[in-house]
Amino acid sequence: MCLEVQEMTRCLRATFILFVFLLVIQNCESETSKSGDYIIYMGAASADESTGNDHHIDLMSTMLKRSGKTPMHRYKHGFSGFATHLSEDEARLMAEQPGVVSVFPDQMLPLHTTRSWDFLVQESYQKESTYFTEMNSQPELDVAVGDTIIGFIDSGIWPESESFNDMHMQPVPDRWKGTCMRGKKTEPDAFRCNRKLIGARYYNSSFLLDPDYETPRDFLGHGTHVASIAAGRTISDASYYGLAGGIMRGGSPTSRIAMYRACSLLGCRGSSILAAFDDAIADGVDIISISMGLFIDNLLEDPLSIGSFHAVERGITVVCSAGNLGPSGQSVVNAAPWMITVGASTIDRGFESNILLGGLDNIRLIKGAGINIANIDRTQSYPIIHARSAKKIGANEKAARNCAGNTMNRTIVEGKIVVCDNDYGNQAIQWKSEEVKRLGGTGVIVIDDKSMDLSYIDPSFLVTIVKPVDGLEIMSYINSTREPIAMIMPTRSRTGHELAPSIPSFSSRGPYLLTRSILKPDIAAPGVNILASWLIGDLNAAPQGKEPPLVNIESGTSMSCPHVSGIAARLKSENPSWSPAAIRSAIMTTAVQITNTGSHITTETGDKATPYDFGAGQVTIFGPSSPGLVYETNQIDYLNFLCYVGFTYDQIKRISTRIPQGFACPVQSSKGDISDINYPSISVSNFNGEESRRVSRTVTNVASRLIGEEDTVYNVSINAPKGLRVRVIPRSLHFKNIGDTLRYQVIFSSSTSTLKEDAFGSITWSNGMYRVRSPFVVTSKADI
């Protein structure tokens, strides 16, 4: 309500402008053929819903309804705005209205689609011997006790899965304010929450959706899979048709789960994602885990950047997948500094699906990788050909070699194992498999060393991947034999024999497209061939003649993200007062950069991985619980970041309700100043070598009083590449009490005018018990 005359005049003026605007809007759609769903973002939610943006939203919503446009979603808890159907002209007019921060299309975001936790336990002991590792000498996965609530924005959940059993769990925490939406299907009581799955919501915002699809239930499997990775209960004797057998469990088995189904068979609508963020903030979650993303370079048009900013403002840790657009550089998504951005890594379990060439008198064994469970007779050999020999008349030869669609002759392919190359753009292995299967082939052998670590699964077909050198041997055999035959052998899993971790080809890489002055991704976690719960009764996931699986094996940064979400939930249970920034810092500064053999982590090509590939390194289980020091990236850092990337103070004032008194954007700032926000890693761009560059960091002592580090001294060690000089001032930090904060500076200089290549290194503080490592990258390249 407008209480003063001046304020009343302003409100009446805004009302009149809106009235005129919405009179115009009624005639706009007929003037343009293009229309669609749009998100109208109006910044932070008002503390008092009767004032500020909420007044404008009420007016807009009312007048939109009068013009026949019903808002699909209304955002009012964590931030303000709504989503509705508009023409392009209407959207442009809407963007000019008072209180509107941004208007952007409601796009569809793709999902970034057991042993992993045991492997992370082992990786924890790859750190150099310290007091910390001696304290945690038990090989079992420690279970944190607590009622941390993880909210998943995903494709829904299958509540009957054993991973979500609430046996022996305590009552739901009183602070939980959410709900369990049963849905509107014919049997709504079929979906039930419990003391483990404490909340569930669903969001439908597209007329393309089946009206019966109004339920939190998962029909894709993705949401069920990621939720069980992060917080699933312990299940003994789990396996995928006998493969990858063992104990399956989530990273934080005692955490509660709240599912927000924002995704359907068509994808994940941005408007639904924002509605899920808005509800999760109000419901009282501690962690938000979100395994999807979109390649957007404008923060005010990215639902994940917007939603996560407001969640973090309220103390909620947001963990996001980095994307599956690798190995190209600048492909990382979800890279705003308030998020934890997670890339993928492998574990030490592989799946062999080898090939036997020739008859009994001349057998050659070729090593292949794949998970073959198809109900096809694998006791006999089949004719084998290269796809090129099945090329249709007139078809492109390179396309045919790669088993591209409509390039091969059915008569030649039928009944045979087909060898496909994989050097034709970004053609997926799935497409090759489906094309050969469509033509009546028996199986596919793909020649591609970059995909060896990603075991492809087709329940109804045989697919195996081989290295190029082995592909040459296969081709030599085919070309030298009148009637070449081969057998694809049954898959077997091998644990403990694989060099790991490494970074798979699909994992998105840095630097961040928006700015090179922040290092992303933040961390890497297992995301290849991960066993976790699945839909019950999913016939599409079952080989012909076999019962549907209760678990499934999936790969992607979608699987990496919940690994870190589970660790974040454990940290929040152990340290309820820790901020999202402290949790991220603890995870990053205790990461490892070496494999299970002691060598440096590599990429899919065997090259040494850099911070662009894995951020601070591979996440560990125990390290984050005792980080020693943390980097607190505070609200001013995030507000300064918005200033540095070009937002005005007026825009920022609309976005955030928590602007400290006296805050103003730094004068003459630029993206290069982002290097100075208090982040656990350091990235310096536009470094010409002629002038030194100085950045500052502040660390806080969080060591436990139980082992007496209240008064402690940390000394610095520097790992710098050749040609780059790095100085740290001071070289020692003396903390007298828990909670003390101290500041240091890092000065980068060079004897050359420019750096020929991006330079990577690290700065590590240690007091003899804890090692606090921060990676850095220095580049001569500038932001666009």
Image (cartoon, grey):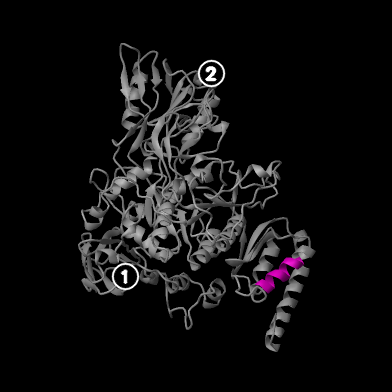
Residue 689 visible, this orientation: yes
Residue 64, percent from left and from top: 75, 64
Residue found at x 48% / y 38%: 427
Q: Tell me which amino acid carries mark 2.
A: Thr
Residue 108, percent from left and from top: 59, 51
Kindly check if marks 2 and 1 are in contact, taking CB atoms under 8 A apart as contact: no
Outermost residue on the top side: it is 361
Q: Which residues are magenta?
A: 54-63
Q: Which residue is mark 1?
A: 699
Q: Which residue is mark 2?
A: 411
Q: Tell me which amino acid carries mark 1.
A: Val
Q: Main secondary structure of the magenta part?
A: helix
Q: How dense is the environment of label 2, judged by Cα within 10 Å: few (below 14), some, or many (20 and up)? A: few
Query: As drawn, is 183 to the left or to the right of 313?
Result: right
Question: Disc number at residue 66?
Answer: none
Residue 783 visible, this orientation: no
Query: As drawn, is 547 to the left or to the right of 347?
Result: right
Say which quadrant the N terminus sits in.
Answer: bottom right
Residue found at x 70% / y 49%: 207
Count how many numbered circles sit on residues in the image: 2
Task: Check residue 721 for magenta coloring.
Answer: no
Sequence-first disc among 2 and 1: 2
